[in-house]
Structures are given as structure tokens and as C-alpha cells.
Amino acid sequence: MKLPKLLLFLLAFSIFSCTKKEEQTTFKFGVWTTADAKKSDADYTKEFKKYKDGGIDEVLINTSTDPKLLKRLVPLATKEGLKVHAWIMAMNRPGDSIALQHPEWYQVSKEGKSCFDTRPYVDYYQWLCPTRKESREHVLKLVEELAKVDGIESVHLDYIRFPDIFLPISLLPKYNLVQDVELPQFDFCYCDECVKAFEKIHHKNPKESHNTSIDMEWKNFRLNAIQAVVNDAYEIAHKHNKNLTAAVFPYPEMADHMVRQRWDKWNIDQVYPMIYNSFYDEEIDWVGYATKQGVADLKDKKTKINTGIYVPGLKNDKELKEAILYAKENGAVGVSFFDGNALSESNFKTIKETKASLK
């Protein structure tokens, strides 16, 4: 009788091992999408079914930080076999009715102008200060309200950074800009709270710095301010048994340089670097380069990388397939497309075929 039991045990162990291996090696496909409360449940069911039929596994949904709308959409997406992430615009809070009642919460440029009424680049750039107690607590409260929603996989942070001190190169002509140096109108945050907190640590005023662009303490202060918000959000998400994920700039050194964001140092479960090669005038193989760099920077950490792909920047379906493969070959655990509405029937066909080839 002992031998059959042993065989049964070995068979069960083999099945379990295969299952675990499959879970570990499954490559995920996702889309970012923005919700509209006016859209009917039937229309959403149709949209989610289209994604699932097209090879998509998860949706990152921007509900404008509305937990009620999120609660409505989660079961619809789940029924179609999709996992849901709650996408939130974190430090950039355009049209936030609560924040707009507190002008002092907003980031201030080196020129002394506040995002409350003087917005860099575009009107929807309304950035809250990550150092000021009230503004950071407001953002973290929003994170918690989303984290409480049953059925979501993660709270997904976006704009978890400072405004762009340097824009992606292909966007510069749009704004008629040359950014060879850090320009004061795009350099944040010099509000009273940031200056006071920095002075307490370093005994100097950044406004009096000879050259803030090479003042490493001042730069590091801002990197740490964002990291502190992320780390607090991580604790909140995990308290509610949810993961924390984030859309970030292509790889840590680049994110550090462009937007004061050093995501390889964060407590976070997964990052979705927006490796939008067309923004940087790069070829499609740059998707692989940037993915590999991020994976290397996260070595020995539990954080995983899901590569973000900008669909309108791709020339054809051949590039779509190449981008997916470059991401996988260089260590990503999945890819996500911006955005769901940009995917055509031929794109979905390519995604399905490429997905099938990876099994």
C-alpha cells in the first residue's frame, strides 16, 4: 500500500510544481483605460469582452479616483476574466475639488509661481507638494479609498513624481522649447514647506544655491519626498491586502534626471515603465534596452517590471510584436498598452498571435 501512496504524492507534487512554474512564467498583457461614469454597464461589458478576446489579461482603470465607479466596474471586468488595477493620478491632481480649496498645497517653481494658478506646459499640470503634511495626506487618503475596493489587484500610481524638468525630446518642438539646462519655470518644488524641511536637514536654503542643478542634497531631498509618499502608499495598500504598482519613466537613471523619480529604491510590488520609444526618437529595440536597464537596477529586489508600450507611436503590427518580444526577452513579466482605445482589430490579432507563441 505504501508504493501507490508514494506515487500519488509524487504525482500531486509534480502537478503542483508545474502549476507554480506556470504561474511564475506567465507573461501578462494589460491596457490602461479611462472610465466614464455615463457609459452603461452593457457598453463596459462589451469593452471588457473585446479586451479579453483580444488577448488582454488586465485593465488599469482611471476612474478619476472615484471608488464608487470603481466598485461598479470591477465585477463587470472580473466577469469577463480580467484583473483590475485602480489607476490614480497621484501628485498631479487636475481638477481635484478638495485640493483646489487649499492653494498652499500646490508645488511652487523656482520662479516662485504656484501650480495652483501658473501651470507648466499644460493646464492639467496641477501638482501637489509631496512634503507638505496636508497635501501628502490627501493623496494617501485617496489611495486608501481605492485600496478598500474589493476585487482589485493593486492601486496603480501615476504621476508619482515632480513636473518634468526635461521633456522627452520629441515633445520639445510642440512647446517651442530648448532644454539644454534646467529652466526655473519647470523646476519644482520651492514652496515654504519644502524649503523649511530642507533647511532643517542641510542648514541651507535651496533658493540661495549657486546652482541647484548640481546641488545633490537638494535633488536627493526631492527624490526622497516622492519615495516617502510611495512607501506610505505601499503600507496602506498592503494593509488592505492589495498590491501597489506604478506607471513610471523608462528606467531609474532617466526618471531621476527627467522628473525626480528614482523608482528602483521604492517599496513597491510592480512598476510599469512607460517605454514610449517614439517620445525619445528611439528605434523599437530601445524597448528592450530600457527594460533591461530597469530589470538590472531592480536586481535582488522583489519588484517586477511590466513594460508600457505606446500604441500610437508604433509604425505597424510588426513593431507591436517586436516591442512585446523585446520586453519579454529582457526580463519584463508583462506588457501594457496605452491605451485600450488605441488598439485596432489588427493589433488585437497580433497580440493574440504573439501571446500564443510565448506558451
Image (cartoon, grey):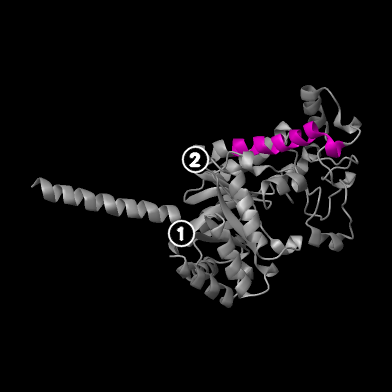
Question: Residue tagged by mark 1?
Answer: 78
Q: Is residue 16 above or below residue 33?
A: above
Q: Residues within 10 Å of mark 2 (few under 14, many from 20)?
A: some
Q: Earlier in the sequence, mark 1 or mark 2?
A: 1
Indicate the position of residue 283 as horizontal and vertical percent values.
Answer: 70, 65
Q: Amino acid at mark 2?
A: His
Q: Amino acid at mark 1?
A: Thr
Residue at x-position 57% and y-position 50%: 67
Indicate the position of residue 112 as horizontal and vertical percent values.
Answer: 89, 39
Is 88 placed left or right of 128 in the picture? Answer: left
State the image quarter where residue 265 is shown: top right
Q: Which mark is residue 189?
A: none
Q: Main secondary structure of the magenta part?
A: helix
Indicate the position of residue 214 as horizontal and vertical percent values.
Answer: 84, 37
Please provide the residue range marked out in magenta.
212-233
Is 25 placed left or right of 201 in the picture? Answer: left
Query: Callout 2: helix, strand or loop?
Result: loop
Q: How many marks?
A: 2
Query: Callout 1: helix, strand or loop?
Result: helix
Q: Residue furthest bottom?
A: 346
Q: Quick one: quadrant of the C terminus?
A: bottom left
Indicate the position of residue 250 as horizontal and vertical percent values.
Answer: 67, 53
Question: Residue tagged by mark 2?
Answer: 240
Residue at x-position 85% and y-position 25%: 204
Residue at x-position 80% and y-position 62%: 170
Q: Is residue 345 magenta?
A: no
Residue at x-position 78% and y-position 49%: 164
Q: Is residue 224 magenta?
A: yes
